[in-house]
Image (cartoon, rainbow, N blue to C red):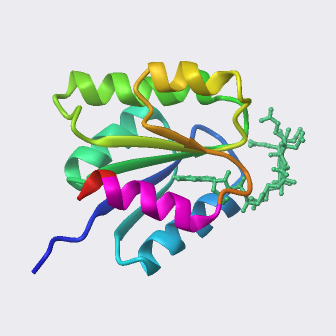
């Protein structure tokens, strides 16, 4: 049997906007992925959970403007722990000027408000399988 794609979803720091991340988690689950929803966590805790849960994808969410500090930190810690093969993606309210910088810091893709779920599913399915 083909192994399902495992995705960890976490909200960065104290971000209170849970609606988008919950909806994405459900859409990925409905598309056949195994989803672990972590809620609000800091980068160190997200990376520990990603390694312990052996996920393929780490999905970060934030609409609070903390993405430039916390999202690259997740990539840095994954690399430091020898888990650089895990794909890191980010969703939320991200100013367009920050997107190239985030990609330069190792975030695979950034999905802003209004992104159709099928685009997220397609991106993950293509890269994780
Ligand atoms: C509803 C709302 C709230 C609600 C949240 C309720 C909830 N349960 O989620 C409440 C009232 C709590 C709230 C609080 C605040 N909010 Co507010 N909020 C909004 C609002 C109006 C809508 C957000 C929403 O639910 N969208 C619907 C969901 C479905 O969309 P989404 O979250 O964007 O998700 C999509 C994508 O972003 C992406 N995505 C999201 N997460 C993930 C994760 C992964 C893995 C992937 C792949 C994709 C992905 O996919 C989703 C589907 O397309 C936005 C404005 C807006 N239009 O975005 C402001 C907004 C996000 N809020 C804002 C602000 C400033 C705040 C506060 C700081 C206000 C305050 N001074 O207290 C606080 C935040 C406190 C905190 N600690 O975080 C600003 C953020 C500005 C910024 N980032 O610089 C916004 C943009 C409003 C504005 N124009 O100023 N907010």
Residue drawn at (61%, 28%) of the image: 99
The image shows residue 26 at horizontal and vertical percentages of 52, 74
Front residue of this view, candidates 77 and 126:
126
Residue drawn at (44%, 61%) of the image: 122
**Residue 7 in view:** no
The image shows residue 38 at horizontal and vertical percentages of 45, 56
> Would you identify the image quadrant in which residue 82 lies?
top left
The residue range painted magenta reads: 116-126
* Quadrant housing the N terminus: bottom left
Q: Is residue 28 above or below residue 89?
A: below
Reply yes or no: does residue 52 show up in magenta. no
**Residue 70 in view:** yes
Residue drawn at (39%, 40%) of the image: 88
The image shows residue 61 at horizontal and vertical percentages of 58, 47
The image shows residue 98 at horizontal and vertical percentages of 65, 23
Q: Is residue 97 left or right of residue 50?
A: right
């Amino acid at each position: 049997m083909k192994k399902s794609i495992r995705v960890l979803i976490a909200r960065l720091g104290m971000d209170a906007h849970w609606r988008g991340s919950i909806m994405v988690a459900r859409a990925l689950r409905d598309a056949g992925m195994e989803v672990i929803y972590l809620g609000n966590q800091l980068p160190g805790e997200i990376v520990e959970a990603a390694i312990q849960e052996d996920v393929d994808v780490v999905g970060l969410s934030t609409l609070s403007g903390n993405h430039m500090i916390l999202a690259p930190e997740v990539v840095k810690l994954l690399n430091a722990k020898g888990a650089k093969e895990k794909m890191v993606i980010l969703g939320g309210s991200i100013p367009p000027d920050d997107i190239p910088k985030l990609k330069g810091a190792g975030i695979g893709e950034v999905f802003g408000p209004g992104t159709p779920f099928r685009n997220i599913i397609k991106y993950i399915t293509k890269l994780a399988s």
